[in-house]
Every structure is written in structure tokens, then in C-alpha cells.
Image (tube, rainbow, N blue to C red):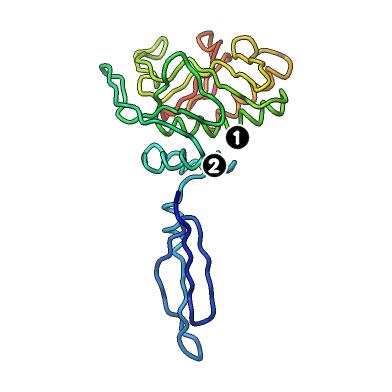
Amino acid sequence: MKKSHSLIALGAGLMIALSGGLVLANWRMAEAANGAVRFARPNYDAARGGAILDLQKYGALGDAKRLAGLSKNLGACHDALAAAGVDFTIAQPEHEGACGYDEALVVDASLSTWKAPEQMAMTCDLAAKMHLWERHIVIPAAEKYLGSPVKEIKAFGTFQCRRVAGHARLSEHAFAKAMDVAGFVLEDGREITVLKDFRNKGAKGDFLREIHDRACGLFDVTLGPDFNADHANHFHLDVGGQYSCR
């Protein structure tokens, strides 16, 4: 937890209270008619540059520049997850031929449980976007359409050394940059699955279609049942850099 800081500037009886991580720089002298007055002038550019992206704020969904920066600044990404209350463990590097990763993590606790048959190692930027999707899109949509929060996100997994079906290139799963989401368990016990409910004409289908469509504005690639039969039972969400919404 970052400590709060305060600064009292005397001379003109001016007090500036500062909290969070605001960085003060560049004390300057202001010349007044009756003499010099000392005051603090914050360097706002420096302050913003070091600020952590707040994943708890809805506006983070549209902060494309800083979201993209999470893949380049691992420390800032870890700080953003921790500040949002996400518990995670750093994963050991893993390599399988051309597949693998050097830096990844496993989410131990988020707003809901992320569950898969195997431990899900993923890049930090994928984890951050998954948390944004969960917090600002999935949970509100479940409450809106189904009247219950989400207790569990059920996934097929993240890291797997495999190629894109029908292509020679490796899938983003091969680099822990993708998650396949199969369904959801609500707090009231109901289970919603992509396979059974995506075409549903009622609330379950409305819920799944909304969270799929809104994922397109957050992840680089979002694929679902409308893409092909291989995705009939899950949403593929990745941060690989290419863009597709199907």
C-alpha cells in the first residue's frame, strides 16, 4: 500500500494536501509586487506517467493506451491487479519447443472463481483484461439479465501448445495469451453455458451475447459460436495483437 503524503507550503498561508501517488516536482519562485512568494507547482505529466491503471474504474475499459502498456510494463501490470484486489501467483517459465512463456501468472482469487481442469497460467495483460471483463461486463450483465451475480467463470484453459485449426501458425494459447471460457455459475446456483445457451431466445442468451459483443472492445480477438463449429462451446479471448470479433 502506498503511503499518503502531505506538503505544507508557508509564505502565503497556502496548504496543499496530497494523497495517493502524486509526485511533486519543480519548486518555483513566483515574483509578486510586494516580494517573492514560494509555492509548490505539481508536475502533472510526471504524476500521470507513474500512476497505476485503476482496474476498478469503469473508464479503464476505454483506456486503450495504458491497457496496451500493461504488456510492456510487467511491474505496472502486477500493481494494477494487486490494487484491484486480485490475488495471483507468479508462474514458473515454461517452454515446449516453439511454445511457452517466460513471464506469466496464475490468478488465485478475483471477484469470482476462475476454474478450469488444469492450472491456468496466463500473461499479466490477459489477466488484467479478464478482470476488467469480469468486473465491468460479465457481473453487471448477469445481474441485469439473470438477477444474480456470477460465482464462477468456467474455462477450458489458457496455455496449450497448439496451432490454429486449419492453419500452420501457432495459437495464442501457445504463449499463454488466450483463455477459452465455457460458461458461468451464478450465486443462486444456476449454470449458463455457451454450448447450450448462446442461441437461447431468453435472458440466458441475451446475457451471453452481450458479454461476447462487449468483449470485442476489450480483447484483441473474441471468437464464439458465430465464428465456426470449433467455437460452439466457448468464447476464445486473447491479447495476441491481431484483431477479430466473430
The percent coordinates of residue 229 (x first, y second) are: 53, 8
Q: Residue 149 placed where, x, y %? A: 66, 27
* Most distant residue in the left direction: 97
Asked which quadrant contains residue 195, the reply is top right
Amino acid type, callout 1: His
Q: Is residue 197 left or right of residue 178?
A: right
For residue 160, above or below residue 122: above
Upstream in sequence: badge 1 or badge 2: 2
Position of 133 with respect to 118 (left or right) is right
Looking at the rendered structure, the secondary structure element under dot 2 is helix
For the residue pair 83 and 228, the one nearer the viewer reads as 83
- Rendering coords of residue 59 (x, y %): 58, 43
- Considering only vertical position in the picture, is 88 above or below 17? above
Residue holding disc 2: 60
Q: Amino acid at mark 2?
A: Ala
Which quarter shows the C terminus?
top right
List x then y, in percent, for residue 226.
58, 15
Q: Which residue is mark 1?
A: 136
| Whether label 1 touches label 2, CB < 8 Å | yes
Name the quadrant containing residue 139. Answer: top right
Q: Residues within 10 Å of mark 1 (few under 14, many from 20)?
A: some
Looking at the image, which residue is at 42% across and 52% down? 50
Residue name at image x 39 percent, y 19 percent: 159
**What residue do we see at 46% from left, 31% from top?**
127
In 3D space, how far apart are the residues under numbered discs 1 and 2 (Cα atoms)?
9 Å
Q: Report the front residue among 127 and 89.
A: 89
**Dot 2 surroundings within 10 Å: few (below 14), some, or many (20 or more)?**
some
The numbered disc on residue 91 is none
Q: Residue placed farthest to the bottom in the image? A: 34
* 92 displayed left or right of 41: left
Determine the residue positioned at 28% across, 17% down.
96
Number of dots carrying numbers:
2
